Structures are given as C-alpha cells and as structure tokens.
Image: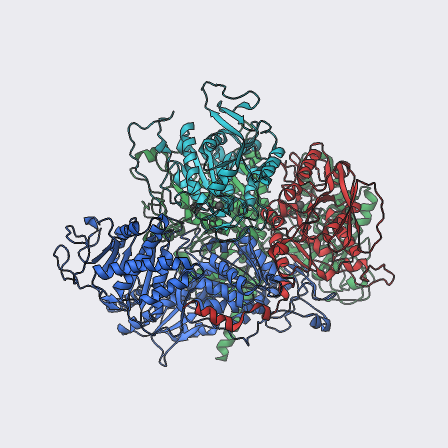
Chain colours: A blue, B green, C red, D cyan
Amino acid sequence: MSKHNEKSLHKQTLHKQTLSKKSPNNKELPQACQAINEFVIRFANTNGTGSASANNMFAKAILRMGIPVSAKNIFPSNIQGMPTWYEVRISEKNYLGRRGGDSELVVAMNSQSINDDINSVKVGGYLLYDATKALNSEQIRGDINYLGIPISAICLKEYSNPRQRQLFKNVIYVGALAALLDMDFAILKDLVKDQFKGKEKLITPNIYALELGYQYAKQQFICPLPIKVESRDLLNNRIMVDGNTATGLGAVYGGATVVGWYPITPSTSVIEKFASYCARLRIDPATGKKNYAIVQAEDELAAIGMAIGGGWNGARAFTATSGPGISLMAEFLGLAYFTEIPVVLVNVQRAGPSTGMPTRTQQSDVLCCAYASHGDTKQVLLFPQDPHECFELTAQAFDLADQLQTPVIIMSDLDLGMNDHLSTEFKWDDNKKYQLGKVLSTEQLDELEVYGRYLDTDGDGICYRTLAGTHADKGAYFNRGTSRNKFAAYTEKSADYIDNMERLTKKLTTASQLVPQPIIKQGKKIAKIGLIYYGTSSHAITETIDHLKEHGLSADTLRIRAFPFNGQLEHFISKHQEIFIIEQNRDAQMKSIIVNECQIDPNKLNSILHFDGLPITSRFIEQAILTHFEQQSSTQQAS
Amino acid sequence: MSKHNEKSLHKQTLHKQTLSKKSPNNKELPQACQAINEFVIRFANTNGTGSASANNMFAKAILRMGIPVSAKNIFPSNIQGMPTWYEVRISEKNYLGRRGGDSELVVAMNSQSINDDINSVKVGGYLLYDATKALNSEQIRGDINYLGIPISAICLKEYSNPRQRQLFKNVIYVGALAALLDMDFAILKDLVKDQFKGKEKLITPNIYALELGYQYAKQQFICPLPIKVESRDLLNNRIMVDGNTATGLGAVYGGATVVGWYPITPSTSVIEKFASYCARLRIDPATGKKNYAIVQAEDELAAIGMAIGGGWNGARAFTATSGPGISLMAEFLGLAYFTEIPVVLVNVQRAGPSTGMPTRTQQSDVLCCAYASHGDTKQVLLFPQDPHECFELTAQAFDLADQLQTPVIIMSDLDLGMNDHLSTEFKWDDNKKYQLGKVLSTEQLDELEVYGRYLDTDGDGICYRTLAGTHADKGAYFNRGTSRNKFAAYTEKSADYIDNMERLTKKLTTASQLVPQPIIKQGKKIAKIGLIYYGTSSHAITETIDHLKEHGLSADTLRIRAFPFNGQLEHFISKHQEIFIIEQNRDAQMKSIIVNECQIDPNKLNSILHFDGLPITSRFIEQAILTHFEQQSSTQQAS
Amino acid sequence: MSFQKSTFHHPRLKVNDLGLTYRDYEGALSTLCAGCGHDSITSAIIQACYELSIEPHKVAKMSGIGCSSKAPNYFMSKAHGFNSVHGRMPSVTTGANMANQALLYLAMSGDGDSASIGFGQFAHVVRRQLNMVYMVANNGVYGLTKGQLAATADKGVKNKAGEISLFNDIDLCSMALQLGASFVARSFSGDKKQLVPLLKAAMSHRGFAFIDIISPCVTFNNHPASTRSYDYVHDHITTAAVTDFIPIKTEITTDCNVGDCEDICLHDGSIMRIKKLDSEYDTRNAHKAIMDIEEHKKKGEILTGLLYFKPTASHFHEINNTCDTPLNQLTQDALCPGARILSGINDSFR
Amino acid sequence: MSFQKSTFHHPRLKVNDLGLTYRDYEGALSTLCAGCGHDSITSAIIQACYELSIEPHKVAKMSGIGCSSKAPNYFMSKAHGFNSVHGRMPSVTTGANMANQALLYLAMSGDGDSASIGFGQFAHVVRRQLNMVYMVANNGVYGLTKGQLAATADKGVKNKAGEISLFNDIDLCSMALQLGASFVARSFSGDKKQLVPLLKAAMSHRGFAFIDIISPCVTFNNHPASTRSYDYVHDHITTAAVTDFIPIKTEITTDCNVGDCEDICLHDGSIMRIKKLDSEYDTRNAHKAIMDIEEHKKKGEILTGLLYFKPTASHFHEINNTCDTPLNQLTQDALCPGARILSGINDSFR
Ligand SMILES: Cc1ncc(C[n+]2csc(CCOP(=O)(O)OP(=O)(O)O)c2C)c(N)n1
Ligand SMILES: Cc1ncc(C[n+]2csc(CCOP(=O)(O)OP(=O)(O)O)c2C)c(N)n1
Ligand code: SF4
Ligand code: SF4
Ligand SMILES: [Mg+2]
Ligand SMILES: [Mg+2]
C-alpha cells in the first residue's frame, strides 16, 4: 500500500450514506469523482474464471446506450489463475484510445492483485470489491470510496454448483454496476438473451444473477454514484468488434480460399473467425461441400509455404501469424518476393523480441517485415487502424497481391486484433469486382506470339503470369527462387540479374501508387506541428489534438496506411516545421524506413516511442510533445 | 561474334613469326598488348574437369615469383559440365580488386562459351585455345592474337586413360603459359611436388605435362609474349589464401569447441576447414579424443540452436551459413539477443534474394542481419576485408560474444570466402588471453549476497551470467525468451520490460566501444571526398584512390569494420563535403543503417551500388564518382 | 543456365493416345553430371507420362532444392513447375493442391531435402494424405553442396571426402509406412523396367504415393565404400513385388501364376497388376513391410518394388470435403457473400 | 509471473543421501491450470530426482514453448533451465550437451512442440542418440494457444471447440522406436507409481531416453469426446512392462516371478528391474513394440510402461569420440594452438 496509506478504519463501505467529505478515519476526503459518460472502469479478475464475457457484456451495454466506449483486455500469457484486467473507457467525447492513469472505478475481484488494484483507483474514485472477506487495514486508502459487496457469500448462498458459484460472481458485479452507474437494466437483459441464444436455459439464471447484484447495490448504496452513464445517440452506426474478426471476415469477402496457418497468440482468432464465417457463408449450397480449404500446418514455415503454393496456383491464399512466426517465414517471404507470387500475410504484432510478452501489444515488426528475408527485398505492408480497415484492407490486400504479384503483409497488432473497438461499420460494394491482376487466359495465350514470364510488357515492372493447366502448349514456365532471365530460364548472367532486380524496384514504385494512400488532416493554414502515425496509435490522436489545442498548439496529421510510400509523405514532412512520428516500438522503426526510403534528414523527425506493451495513450503523446517544446524553449533561452 | 568480326582468315596462330602489324587478313593490327607484371588472364573452362587446381597452380606460381596476384573463381551453381571462369590479375602496383573489362590473355578451353570468351579478349590481346579443332571464321577477330595449341590432340597422343586425357589438358596450358609469359619453370615444378606430397607417383606425369605445354609453346611461338612476368620481391610476407580457410582457422584459435552447421554454398568450407584444422590441432594427445564436437545439423534452425545451446552452457560455439540460412535463423537470433547468449555466426554472403545466384557474391544481408528477428533487436556485426581479418575478427568474435553476451555475426562474402586473396599473414600473440566476459565462478557466487541474472551492476548494460553446474545453491536461473525482471523471473510488468529493453540498448552502446574500430585514412588536409566502404570492396580502393588522383581528385577513406558504430563514422562524414558509400547491394543497405543509427541526412550520402554478383571493380567506383562530379558541374553550369 | 532443346518434330515419331510424341514430354537439357542417376529418373518419368498419355499441362512439377530438385526442369517443359526452397516442397505442394485438385502433382525431392531439413514437412504431408506422387532421389549424399552425408546414408559408410556416417540411417519408406502413406515403393534409377510401371501406378493412384528411388551420385557417392553406388546397388538389390500397368480398355491377359498376382482396378478404370516376386510378400501389411525392409537391410540387401498399397485410400480433399470445382476457379459470385449479408453481420456487432 | 516459494526448511523434513529435502527439488509455484496433468509430471520428476539423490545443480532443464514447456520452471529451482523457442528444444539441448556432457539433461516438450513444429528436430535428436531424458507431455491439444488439435490426437476425436481430428495421429513412441531410440516408454501423469520408476530408469540410462507421458489438459481436452481425458485414460490404460529402480549398494530382493522379471545393471552400478505385466511382452524388440502399440490402439487401449530398452546403447559423445573433460571446461592452453604453429600454417599459404 505504497500510495495513500491510511491505517485506522471504521467503515469500509458507503452503505446507504451520502458520500461524506470525511474519510472513514475522519480525514478530509477529496472531492468524490463526478462524471457523466466520461470515465474509466477497470475490472481486475483472475483469468479462466469467466470474467471476460461478463465484462464484455458490461461494455456492450454501454454501447447499446448509445455512448462511445472502448475496452482493453490486459491478460496474461497463461490459461488460468493469473491476474487479468479489463479496462473500459466510456467517453462521449469519442476519446477511444486507452486513457491510462488511475481509474474512476475499479472492480477488484482478484485477491492476488488487489493491493495494486486498490492503488490504481483515482483519488476520489471508487473501489467495488468482494466484501465477503474484510479488507485489511493496509488496504484502506483514505482518499477513495469503498463499495463492498459480499459477492462470494451471495453466491455461496444462492448456488450449490461450484462452477456456478464462480461464474455468477461476475454477473453479480455487473448487476451492481447497473445500479451504481444508472445503466439501462433492460439492455443488460437483452444482452443476456442474445448471448444465450440457443441455450435458453441459461437466460433466467443469468438475469437472476444480474438482479442479485442490482438489488444489493440499490439497497445498500446511494445509487447512482456521482459517476454514471446517460443514454445518448452518439454511435453514428458504428459497430463494436475486434480487429481479428474483421480481418477474418475481410478475407472471406476478399475471396480467400486457401489457408495454411499455425496457432499463435494474438493471431489465432483471425483464422478461427475466417473458418467460422466460411462454415456459415462458404458451403456450396448444392453439394454441402466447402468452397475453401484450411489446413492447420505443422509450423509457420509450412503455413506460409501452403499460402504461397496456393497463390502460385491462382487461388487467393493467406496465412496469419505473430512475432516468432514472422521470423520463421522470412525465407519463404523472400521466395515469394523474388518469384513474384501473390500471397497475403496477416501479422498481428505482439511485444517482442523473441517470445517477449505474447499477450501485449506493439508495432515492432515494421522493419523486419518491410525488408523481410536476406538479400535485397522490399515487401508491401498495410497498416489498418481499426476493425473497419481490418476488413477493408484485408479484402483489398488480395487485390493488391494479385495485381502486384508479391506478398502483401497486413500489419495489425494485439490491441487492434484482440480488443473490441468502436468502428465504422463494414462496407461492401457489390459492383466492385476482384482485381485479379495480369493472368493470361487460354485465349490470350493463344493470341500471344512469345510468352516470357518476366517480360515487362507494360513498363510498370509487373509482368504477365500464367496458371498451370491453362493452355496445352503455351505459357508453362519453371518457377524458381534462383535468378532467371525474362523467359524464366535460369541465368547467372550479370545483366539479366540486374535487369530483373531493377524491374522489381520499379514494381515497388508502381505499388506505391496502388496501395491505400495516407490520410492527411490539415487545415487551410498549415500547422506548425505535423504528427505522423499509423495503426492503433490513431485511437489516441483526436484526444491529443484537442489537448494540444488547450496548450495553444495546433497540429496537422498524416496517418500512414501502407508501405511503399509515395510523395505525399515527403510533402507533408517538408511542409511542417516540427514533425513527430508516433510509434509503439523502441527503435523508431517506421522513422528508419521513412528516412531511408524518402531520403529525409532524420534530425527533422522527432520520435515518440511507446513500447511498454500496453496500447499507447494520448497522455503519453501530449507529454512527449510538450516536453519537446519546453526543452526547446529552455535551450533557446539559454543560448 | 558481335564485337570485332573479321571474316576471311589465313593464319590463325602466331606460329614462330614476329608479331606483325598486320592481321591475318592484312588489315592493320592494333598494337599488341604489352605489359610486365600488370595484366589479367582469364581461364575459361568447364566445371568438373579439374581445371581449378591447374589454374590455381598458375596463380600460385606468380605469387612465388614475388609478384602480387589476385584470382577470382567465377563458377556456376552446378557440379559438372557448365562454363566456369578463373580470372587472374597480376599487378605489381598491388591493385588486387577485380579489374573488370576485357583481358589481355584468355585461355579458352570451353567450347560452350568460346564465342563469349573470344569477345572478352582485349584489343591487341591474346587468345590461347585448343587448336585440335580449327576455329570457324566467325570466331576470328582481326584485332587480337591467336595462340592455337592442339591440346586435345597432344593428350590423345600422350595418354590412353580418358581421365588423364582430360586432366592433363589443364596442366599443358599452364606449361605453355610458363613459356609464353616467361614464368619460372622451377617454381611450377616445386608446386607440383608440393601439391602431390604423399602421392609421389603423380609428380612425374604432371611435370611431364607441364613440359609438353612448355616445349610446344617454345617451339611454335615467339616466347615470351609482349605481356609477361618478371620476378619481384613485392609480397612483404603476405600469404595467399581464401577467407573461409582463415575463418575456420580463426575459430580454432578463438577457442571454438561446439559447432552445429548445415551445408550451404559459399559457407560450407568455413566448417570443413575448421574441422580439418581441428583434426590436426585439437585431438587430445593423451587420449586421442576430440577437444571439440561438430554436428552436421538437420537444417539451419537446428544449426544455430545447437550453437546457442553450446553458448548458453559456456562453450565457444558457432555456426556458418549464407542467404537462406540467415533467414531461417532469424527466430533463434532474436532469442539469443533477448536472452543474452554469446554465439558466433559466420555469414558468407551470396547474391540474393531467395536462392538468387548462389555462386555469386554480394553484401546484401547487411540490413537483415543488423536487425535480425522480429521485435526491437540489434545485432553486432563484424566486416572482415581479407583473410587476415577473417582470421583475426573470427577469433575476436568469440571474445566479443562472451564479453557482450550476444550474437556476433561475421559478415564475409563469397568473394572473400571462396577466392584466394593476397593478405597479411595470420598473427597470434601467445600472451593474449581469451576474454570470457562476466561469468561468475563458484567462489564469486559464494561471496555474493544476491544474484540477479539481469542486474546491471556495472552500469554498462552487461550483467553477470552463471553456468549450469557451477554452484550447488546459487546462481541458477531459468533462461527464457519471454520478458523477465532483473532476477530472471517471468514478468509482464511494463516497467520491468522497459527497463530491460533500455538496458539492451545501453549494451549496444557499450558494444560500439568494444568492437573493432573503423580504419580511417586521411591526410593532414581533409580531402573533399570521403569514401566509406566495408568488406571486400576494400580491394578496389587503392586503385580507385590512385586513379582519382589522376583526375585531380583526392579522397580520404573510412572502412567500417563493425556495427554498432561509434562517433568516428559521424565525425568522418561531417568533415567531408562529398561522401560516397560503396556497397555491393541494390538497396544501399549500409547507408540505411548509417542514416538511421547516426542520424545523418541521407542527402549528404551518395551511394555507389554494385550488385551484379561479381566482385566490385575500381573502374565501377571511379566511373560513379566521376559521373557524379560531371553531373554536378553541369547542373552548376546550367543554373 | 538451361538450354531448350529444339522443338522440331520428326514427322514419323510415334505418338500416344493424345497424339503427343515422346519429345513432347521432354524438358530442358539436363545440367546434371553425366551419368547422374537423377537423369535416369527423369527419363523414366517422361516414359511413364508419355505412355499413360498424361496431358503435360495438367501436371504440376514440384521440388525443393538440390540436384534432384532441379530434375523437374528436365522433363515436360509444357508443364508448370515450382522449384521452391530447400526442404519445403511438401508445404508448397499442399497449398498448390488445395488451390487446384485437378492437376497431377509430380514432386521430386532429394534425401537431404526430405530426410533432413524437410523431414517435418515430409511427415506431415504423408499424414495429410495429399494426392500426389512424392519421389525422393536417394543418393545418400548432398550432391549440390558437394558430397556431405545425407541422413539416409547407411551407418558406417564413407562419403567421398572420407567422412564416416556415424548414425543409423533414416529409412524414408519405413517412415512413410509408419505415417500411413497409402502407396509406398522403393526403386532404383538404374532399373527402368521396374521404375516405369511403379511410376505409372503411383500417378494413377488417388492418394499419397511415395517412391524412394535409389539414384547414384556419380560424382560424390559412387565409390567402393558407398552403399549407394551403381555397383553396390546392382549387386544387392532384391525385389518383393512389382507392378504392371494396364490402361483402361485394354484386354487383360494373365501372365503370372495365380496367387502371386493381383489385379486392382483404380479409380479411373485402369488396372494395376501387382506381381509378387517373393510369394511370401504381403503388399497390404505396412508393418510387415517395415520389418521386411529392415531384415533385408541386415542381410546387406536392398528391398525394392511395391512395398505397400492401399487401393481404397482417401485423400486430403475427400477428408476436407472440398467442393469439386478447383478452388482457384471459383468466381467472385461463389466466394463473396455480398453487401446484404454484410449488413446482417454488422448488426451482430451492435 | 512466477512466484518463489519460501525456502525455509522444516528441521525434521526427511533428507536423501545428499542431505537434501524434497523441497530442495521444488521449483517456482506453478501457474498452470489447477488439475493440469503437467503438474503431476512435475511432481513425479521431483520425487524421482529426490529419491535418486541427483544433485540439482548438475541438472539442466530444457524445454520448448507451451504449457508443458513451462513445467521445468516448477521443479528444481537450483538447476539452470532453458525455455527456448517452439519446437527447437532438441537442437538447443544438443548444443548444451555438446558443451557439457557432465550434466543430466531433463527435457520437457509438448505434443505440439514435438510432433508438429519440432518433428524434424525430434527425429534427429533421436537419431543422434543424445544422452538425455526427452519427455513429452502428451495432451492431444495445444494447451497454451487454447485447445487446437495436436498431431498426436486420435483420428476422429473432437477438441473442446468441436473441431474433429481428421488425420491419423502421429505416435511419438512408435516414431522414437523406428528412429532407434534406446529407451522408450509411455506413461500417464495420473499414475505416479508407474511414472516415477520409469523416470528414474530413464535418468539413469546413458543414452537417449524417450518418455511420452499422457497428461490431460483439464481446460481444453478433458471432455467426454476426448481420448486424452482423465476418465478415458484411466479406463483404457494397459501396461506391458514396468520398471523398478534399485540404487547402487542396495540389497537386491526378488519380488517377482522368474521369467517375467529382469535385472539390468546400469553404467553407474544401480539396477533397473524390468517387471513384465504381460509375460508375452519383449522389451528388446522395437518392431514388436510398434506393433503392440498399434494393436492396443485398435482395441481402444493405451499401452503404457517400458516399451523398449537397449542397455548397451552408446550415445553421441561416445560416437563422436569427444574428450572426457566437458568442452566448456577446456582452457585456452588446450584449445589454442599458439603462434608457433600458426607460422607453419602461414607458410603453407606461400
Ligand atoms: C535453406 C538452405 N539450406 C541449404 C541450402 C544448400 N543446399 C542446396 S542443395 C542442398 C542439399 C541437397 O541434397 P539432396 O536434397 O540430397 O539433393 P541432391 O543434390 O543430393 O540430389 C543443400 C544443403 C539451401 N539451398 N537452402
Ligand atoms: C514459432 C511459434 N509458433 C507458435 C507459437 C505459439 N504457441 C505457443 S505454445 C504452442 C503450442 C503448445 O502446444 P503443446 O506443445 O502441445 O504444449 P501444451 O501447451 O499442450 O502443453 C503454440 C503453437 C510460438 N510460441 N512460437
Ligand atoms: S553431383 Fe551427384 S547428384 Fe548432383 S548432378 Fe552430379 S552426380 Fe547427380
Ligand atoms: S491449458 Fe491445459 S495444458 Fe495448459 S495449463 Fe491448462 S490444463 Fe494444462
Ligand atoms: Mg541427395
Ligand atoms: Mg499439448
């Protein structure tokens, strides 16, 4: 109890009493936190106890009340029995990045971590805890409010089955929160019904558990608390979903049929979701047979090998992996780059290096993906910011891979992939046709006089490919990772080799025009500050801009959505006096690539690097920017 | 016969006639090439025919005449029957890089490639060919001199065994060259004797074959030719050896005992040489048992895994590989970086990407080795320039790995590894002791109160490690690729993680001071031009500097010998107006790293990129520099 | 470098049922060493395909890296080929087959490629019962990297450099049998009479077919101390059962004793005739096959021929229940659920 | 997170020959699921090591990645451990053993770790006969990544998510037998009585010892449709032969019928007693073992116990002829040939 240690203790909980200005030991209590639709609740649980679905229900209830909400699951790399947290930010200002700092309300259900959890309550905030066992005096802070509910005792009394006793604890605190925060109880009931569709027997006991909590809170505490929610209509059609689900669905819409994969956190659910959508949407109605094939491979080398085999043979093929899997795929990524095979790879990044922190988020594979494999290689990368883009860029990735005949890597991360995000809904235009790129049909081959697999007929670095089985006499070639001439024959001739390598460079230039362009937000008057960021860092940016304004600083922004870059990035950098590149890694990896590819003086670029494994916060970014300017002005004063 | 095609033909060879000014068809002959100790001979053979040892004998004979010589073997990725070339540059000016361009003398023994080979003779130069079958008229150039020897016919007459008929062809042309170039025949005889030590029966027939060629030339041609050699004493104790032999020997001297490896060109001979030196020098005299263990692993993942296991357990362990193997080792390199295990990896680079050109040279794994593996990683790299440094830096790599507790990668290349180079002799100081780094002994552990594997006691980022079996009670820890705190316990705490990652950054700073420093050559007056290069590009540099002087340009040089860099590189760059970075890859990989690590404006750095798979030439570099200045002055004039 | 042979057809060359000549099944000129066993395998493949009247462009030639893995370049230039990376042919073939089950997958690997770096992928493609012909050109060494010992080299033998093989060999046929391959054979590149019908049977088999083909490396493993030299293999070969291949609509004649001869009707209607040379041999018993291989090995003999065959095997796509249209031919209509369904999905996230 | 247990020793705890208590063999508190089979393996290892009086710091604990691979953290904190990368424990152990043959290598892997991603390394470490104890905690699923089917899952079973195992399982004992392992056993984490003596025998064996330990995953593979659940294994287990372990200098008593009982003197002088429960069983016949495993499987039974043992096996260092001093203890004097020899070498390049 390092923080606000208060020894003596009279009353632990705010039982039916007005929030007094006095703490239980008569010290002056700080102003109790007050907030409507703008606060953070942190749930501290033990993993494997079923808390995830209850916490999720809570977040979804806020959503259905029309209030913007974001949720971060902070879980351990183990299966059962270790501390896990779920942080829900409610923000009608639409600040949906992780806020960071202490929380207004902490639901502390894990005795292993409770001391830390108590310390994570904001001064004036609230601690909801299981009062079955009294807190010890060390655990009493004078500056927060305690909401004790004898949850275990209630469960012990109400349920006989040990599993139920465990599970319903979570539902009970959600019920209590409904009362404390003034949530719409009907919504919670609906959610229970939705959740147990098909298992109707479970609906009543769950609702009963909700009510147990609700009633207990109503009776024992003054409800609602000064922090509470109010229904709004602020969603604008947005949905709440995790990025991996969106990516899996994007692959279905993008026409993927061949998947090789190997399980690894946090990418596993990309494939699981793809598989379950396929099972629903991709069974041939006539025969009941599958319009797709998924193989759980023996490892990541085999997984990407299968995807490449599928891509070579003209199917839309992909795989998904994280950290160690990316390293293992390096050799094959070089093969696909050099043999020009379309293939899509989803990299849901986690905290490295090595096994690192497998259940934490980072953007630290940027460099190793951009230049994956030995030799001179460059890969095409896409950086989705939210589930909407996970869906859209994944579907588009298959077009790009086919058009460019090269691997396309989707750079997601654990935060995006595994956490629920409020996001623009998924969109699909039925008139849009798959771009299958330059593949010659039987008829086209018939008409052709000479076919050369690596003839750059169009001058864009992209050549025409053929598929096995297309034509009885023409177009066959021997695909190889060794160097070859324009007619795909093996060569060790320097001139042929150089010619091919330079064409591949040209192809990347073509790619820079085809890939999704950066999103630039810029006023008529160019601001002094330019913020460059990508992927999940974007969730912190609206908040950052607002707060910087409060400090009299205005900033334009550029969000990178793909590598290779085109001129827009250089232009943006050249137009701004102070550029900050925001990244979630230690080594400023994107900055390295920008400097290198755009020939930009690195001294022009300031890095803001957040790499502790948790999603970046606006506070962190603001702090870095303000410190930068403070230092600048102090050196200016000094000189 | 694209080049100097001359149709009609009277005489193909210069049989006992003075070199006339007229070509066989009475056209004016260009001046016949004249040179003493300063020319290039190119041997064109078929691989698998035993030419390599004959050609090598030729080069070594030049060496023993005290004349600087360099030899490049340009061989196909196949075992038998394909064209192969051997280029010998004789240069008493000590220009030992590949010269490039056409050769003064071509020995054309391969009918597959002979047309190209004829075209590769310099105007006024000489073609030595097998005249058993007459050349066709297409193959007659008016501007070169033909030296026809009926080699096959001689062999047919002299030998009955078909293998001998084949093998001795090569020896015969070497004998002929001895006469034509005025070589010391006694030296050739000695070389034969050295070569067949232990197989004495082969000496006489080989010498006989030499004499067959010698006598034929003496009788049929005016010997010596205007190009010829003269004995000198220009070697200064230098030796001629390939880099892989030196690396293997360096590992013996560096105390390596554990090797896991997997065959791959051009790294295989590193291990083969290590093994053969070990068999000679590392057998326990008392027991006849091996003081080392070498395992041919099942693949590169296993190879580096073994080396890491050995390094973890306190042995000096290494592996060697090339291109695809580097990609396959990425995951393990990240593990070794993050768990801080000493291990040495020899990367003999070849032309990528993918399988690429496995028998061609490149420096194109720089980027992927410096930042090997997913997540934020940085690896220590060493760049030897010649066999002397292969020996020295390899031995030192084991010290560095132990001192820094991290992988050390030796960045050799095919040119360095597989070609013979004239090089300073190997040196060893018996007083120098292995630097085993911070490893705690039983006694030290006894004295220690608390042991933490990752406590940065000395503030240099390097912590104290312990070895299994050292102490009954203290010092044991669980080595893991997951993040851990200072006491090696698993952690997902952000603060612990960051602390560790920042310490690793600090360790790299310490490394930058320990690694071999760059070699800077700089006059009192700082030159306008600064050339930065590394590895085998160095062989072209003396020549480049001399030639630039002829153009009125003076240049200082900095040769990079290791990554991470320290301040000297930045300083050199800042002091020079025009910086050129010379590399043998397409993507300016070293430049990227310099820009990124030293925060240098890339626009200050000009790249000279040679990546056709053959060793870089001074001509190429000069050309690039001169063109740069021409363009500069023309834009200046224009503006 | 690779050379194209002239494609001029002599008008009187014999043609097969498709009207194609033998030369239509050839590939680029081999760049392997003169006498390399792999070239004989190439020519056996050409003969088998020609005689079976396989459409060249309906074949996919797959390989890893090695001298053996170059071989697909030397047969059927009208077929697409994929020379992938070392040891990973099985995964690439799996993906290719997933995408298009209508092709015949002829895959060539080496013993280094399959028994060392690729052993994991080898095992798992067997397990998945991919419909393919998996050939290993077994020379006991790494040819392309100049003669290191392979894991298939017999314990105690020396390579050309004099290094001794210290460990027991990995017998890929035994492994394939143990892992459940439905067709397992061993043959010898020098014995076309045995090899060609085995190849035909393997190509006609629907399911995973494995053939380990002893294929001497003349350059690095043809010396007296080798057990993969031409001489050694010639002298120590013994055969359990061989196959004859009788195409559809051919009259079936009986040319062997009842009991030692079995006709099996394959899925396309052609007949595979198994002739037992050792009347004790049971081609339906995988375990006995493993033991027989080993017993012969103990006696210094190399057991070849058809070692095991399960005519009723199923293959990956059957097990996966994939639709009959090759996946690479499905159109956007079949693949994309469209906007209407998407709006329902959106609703599930509200 | 990992927790250190308090190291306070109760004065009256029993001690072994080294004067160490049971608790001296314990590790960090387990973070596995309550009831996970892997924790039982951990405690069997602790018991075996305690009873054998193994010096903890002379042990190296090796593992890959997975719930099972975490287990070494939960025993013997006084031993160094190396939790490496997924599927690559065998190579790291090989290197470690090459460097120091004086340690006892206790290696823990999972069925995902060994039968899928690590299958190649598994096969090759068996082949090299590394002196180690290779344990696989076989639960038929990938525990740590939440329940995907492993390649050891029986064909037809379902995982918790309802996915069916479509292919034949890979039986790691059969593979180890086929690849020439000198000690092969199967056991059950729930049967300490059988497991502890097997572990002791494996630890005392000089050579490669493999133990496949069925170890139910309570969270993802303990349901009725599983063949790796506690209930299923309990009901279907059958045992061929078990071992007793009799340390050096212990009087040997006869407690079993002649013929079904065999005493084998190990290299350190202790005795391993093999007791056959099935008197037909032959622990010296690897092929029969493979067939027996399969026959039992066909009957729905799981054959456990000591399946094969070759007491005279050699191991890697013997085969390699490595010097007796562990390589990591050789000094510069022994390793570095010095300047004089170097000058001779220089001369060879002139
Ligand atoms: C990842 C990787 N490692 C190593 C090599 C080098 N290499 C090329 S072929 C080969 C072995 C070939 O042996 P095998 O498969 O038996 O084929 P063979 O040449 O004997 O027919 C090796 C190790 C490579 N190309 N890629
Ligand atoms: C290269 C790599 N791929 C995937 C993973 C993710 N991963 C962690 S454990 C595991 C499987 C574990 O299964 P098993 O070996 O059976 O151990 P169990 O958890 O069942 O004991 C996987 C796939 C990883 N850590 N590294
Ligand atoms: S080296 Fe051996 S395997 Fe390779 S082509 Fe030559 S003979 Fe064949
Ligand atoms: S998930 Fe399964 S294997 Fe992992 S700890 Fe839990 S019970 Fe054990
Ligand atoms: Mg081979
Ligand atoms: Mg498992």
Which quadrant would the N terminus of chain B be assigned to in this image?
A: bottom right
Task: Tell me, yes or no, if residue B286 can be seen here.
Answer: no
The residue lying toward the viewer, choosing from B385 and A335, is A335
Q: Residue B128 appears in which quarter of the rendering?
A: bottom right
The residue lying toward the viewer, choosing from C67 and A255, is A255
- Relative side of C64 to C26, left or right: left
- Relative side of D24 to C313, left or right: left
Where is residue A595? Give x, y as percent. 44, 66
- Relative side of A287 to D200, left or right: right
The residue lying toward the viewer, choosing from A540 and A513, is A540
Where is residue D197? Give x, y as percent. 47, 29
Task: Tell me, yes or no, if residue D103 can be seen here.
Answer: yes
Is A356 situated above or below A225?
Answer: above
Which residue is located at x 42 percent, y 29 percent?
D54
Is B540 situated above or below C173?
Answer: below
Q: How many marks?
A: 0
Where is residue C88? Give x, y as percent. 60, 52
Q: Residue furthest bottom?
A: A524
